[in-house]
Image: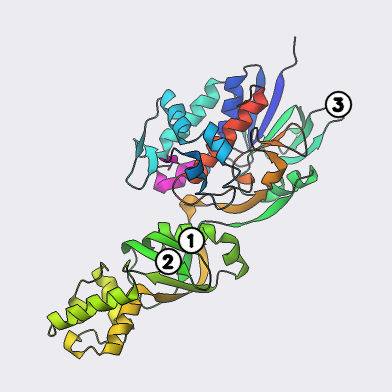
Amino acid sequence: MAEPNRVIVVGGGAAGFFGAIACAEANHASEVTLHESTAHLLAKVRVSGGGRCNVTHSCFDARDMAKRYPRGSRELIGPLSRFGPEQTIAWYAKRGVELKTEKDGRMFPVTDSSATIVDCLTAAARNCGVNVRTGSGLRSLVKSAGGGFVATLSDLGEVPCDKVLLATGGAKGPAGQSIPESLGHTVTPAVPSLFTFHIDDPRLTGLEGLSVPMAEATVKGTKLRELGPVLVTHWGLSGPAILRLSAWGARDLHKVDYKFTLCVNWAERATDRAKAELEAERAAHPKRQVSNATLLGIPARLWVRLVIASGLAADATWSGVSNDKLKALALQATAAEFSVSGKSMNKEEFVTCGGVSLAEVDMATMESRKCAGLYFAGEVLDIDGITGGFNFQAAWTTGWQAGRAMAGVGT
């Protein structure tokens, strides 16, 4: 009788669960144990999307989907063609979970509750015989002389196994950094990838919660530019455009210690066009108070702040607006500059940039090219996506491939 396939999965997040389930379902002879160092399983799944869980994105072309990954774009084309959003939707549907698509392409469970996804994953793991252990962290991992590994776990001590999947999230701590390095891998240090911008500016003070549906955000002096919703927060600016900007600029912004100049076009039009529209308003309504106008698609409360920032009094009328002041107002609307002094992590979408070098991983199986029997999935790899369900999709994709490969059935 063949020896059982002893598999250890390290990390109780999305990628770890998906990898463990894929392995156990594909090969019932596999003995799969999932080890999570904390007491909390699927922690990021629970809080993502405001507690609704943004499972994936309705982008069904692998090449197009891959463009949403600042790191890993080229390497993910193949994996996403094998297990992308379409396969993810089918996987959950088979297990009784229906997903819905919102206007921006994000996909959530129809229940609007992340508990639906957590319950589905934990039930699937239980049903296929995955042994889940919490409070069980990986301390070290060494190759055995006769093949396989000896894993030293915080609760069990030394445990022999045949294959190991590292799905520990961002490359921090021994399981995410020093253990891959000890087995020959190059690990790029992790830095934040999705974060919001700290800005202390009177134009924003008191406007917390105000959202501009479509604005352009640019990091001055760089090619970083994003278009989308921008949200005013207690600490500065957030929203999809800002989060995408932070993802694409993760390493560059880290290098400058998150201190830079942000330019925002609130009006979604060029300065000259905005200036012409303001001139027309001045000619048509000379007696109207400037701050009472609703122009250029800018929310009224923000418009008042921009009027004051341009040097006009709050009660100024259009007849008193000089050409210089009108140009200053057009610039405030289309090229407002803000000094960014730091960052805050977006707790719902905490993601890091960095991890195990993709050149050292077989992207068809997620097996190490440096150490046979060692596999990787999820954010421990140097892969990260923009906000919108792309990071979870990378977790499902790489977890599924790794699990199938560990089971010996391929992809």
- Identify the disc placed on residue 245: 1
Which residue lies under the disc numbered 2? 217
Label 1 element class: helix
Q: Does the magenta stretch include residue 46?
A: yes
Instruction: Give the crowd class for mark 1: few <14, some 14-19, many >=20 residues within 10 Å.
Output: many
Task: Please give the name of the residue rendered at 33% of the width and 75% of the height, measured from the top-left corner.
Answer: 271
Number of marks drawn: 3
The answer to whether one can see residue 380 in this image is yes
Q: Does the magenta stretch include residue 48?
A: yes
Task: Please give the name of the residue rendered at 37% of the width and 62% of the height, measured from the top-left corner.
Answer: 230
Q: Which colour scheme is used?
A: rainbow
Circles 2 and 3: CB distance less than 8 Å? Answer: no
Nearest the viewer among 36 and 101 is 101
CA–CA distance in space, label 2 to label 3: 56 Å
Task: Please give the name of the residue rendered at 60% of the width and 31% of the height, measured from the top-left corner.
Answer: 401
Residue 229: x percent and y percent? 36, 59
Circles 1 and 3: CB distance less than 8 Å? Answer: no
291 relative to 409, above or below:
below
CA–CA distance in space, label 1 to label 3: 49 Å
Tell me if 145 is positioned left or right of 14 in this view. Answer: right
Task: Compare marks 2 and 1 and give the one earlier in the sequence.
Answer: 2
Q: What residue type is labelled 2?
A: Ala
Residue 370: x percent and y percent? 77, 39
Nearest the viewer among 395 and 142 is 395
Nearest the viewer among 195 and 86 is 86
353 relative to 118, above or below:
below
- Identify the disc placed on residue 146: 3
On-image quarter of the N terminus: top right
Task: Please give the name of the residue rendered at 56% of the width and 40% of the height, measured from the top-left corner.
Answer: 77
